[in-house]
Image: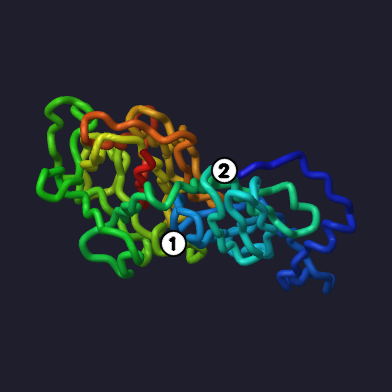
Amino acid sequence: MMNKAPLRRSATVALALTLSLGLMACGGGITPTVIEVTDVNITLDRNTLSPGETTKAHVVVRGNVVEQLPNQAVTWTSSDKTVATVDENGLITAKAVGKATIRAASAVPGFTNIFSETTITVVAAETAYPTARFSFRPVKTAGPVPTGYTADNGLPYNTTRGYGWVTQDTARSVTPTPIDASKNTRDRRTDLGATTAVEERQYTLIHLQCGNICKLPHITENVAWEYRVEPGKYNVTVGVGDANQSTQDSGPSQHTVNVEGVTLIDKFSATRANPFREATTANAVPVTDGLLTVDAIGGTNTKINYIMITRVE
């Protein structure tokens, strides 16, 4: 979640943030470009810990000049240090059962009111469950599967594998219809318009709502993802977006993710300056039928990069 308060910058601050790109004017002067911080984005390796465990928070600071990242310095804080602490490098340490909000705010003078927040849940060690992590990607990619993640290649759901894709219209029904969505997977690493300011999880994706928007190959049927779990309550973290910057111009994407009918991301419209979003369920979602369902109902051309699922009850 990225927040912006009204910015008030003096001429002195603006001057301090001016990067001379070396464009010489006819009269021999320099045409300056002001590099402004526009977005701070946090992603987590894990979102649920037990006391004593640690996880790394990653941050990317973006600005108004796509080709030039601004100063990446941020200030890390925790809303409740008795639950979880975070050091200057983004290393989070769980202290006690509860929830804490971790914030990364730009440390650039004049832009310290631009920040991103994420939630860490700390559960008792004796009730801690492992986190399932999936990276949505083609079978063949230019990069490795992220450490700790299972590759989901868009294959139809089956009971042997325990996860996969079904038609959106039949998801959460008694008899969901499996569908092969592998043609909707993408690896953006080798695309001409790909940004390099991303982590491995964000290079790959799967389209949930191609329709007539996507380039071939693709399927036009809207799809949903299902994962077999034991009845209980689950924390879910999802990352959406597209590393190919040219797609931010052509659109239209309004990334929407619902988990068990609960909206986690609502019509997020990516830009070149802010191409990704990660979100975690505010409250653990209950699953009673043994299948955790993720869909994009209400969105347009939603693209999911990865998902993390942790049982908490």
Quarter containing the N terminus: top right
Q: Amino acid at mark 2?
A: Met
How packed is label 2: few (under 14 Cα within 10 Å), some, or many (20 or more)?
Answer: some
* Count of numbered labels shown in the rendering: 2
- Going by the image, does 100 lie left or right of 287? right
What numbered label is drawn on residue 153?
A: none
Question: What element does badge 1 sit on?
Answer: loop
Tell me where residue 248 appears, x and y as whole percent: 47, 47
- Work out how far the residue at label 2 is from the one at label 1, CA to CA, in angstroms: 23 Å
**Residue closest to the eye, 193 or 234:** 234
Tell me where residue 191 appears, x and y as whole percent: 37, 63
Residue at which label 2 appears: 1
Quarter containing the C terminus: top left
**Residue closest to the eye, 21 or 297:** 297
Q: Quadrant of residue 285?
A: top left
Q: Nearer the viewer, mark 2 or mark 1?
A: 2
Q: Are marks 2 and 1 in contact (CB under 8 Å)?
A: no
Q: Residue furthest front?
A: 126
Nearer-N-terminus badge (2/1): 2
Tell me where residue 8 appears, x and y as whole percent: 83, 45
Residue at which label 1 appears: 194
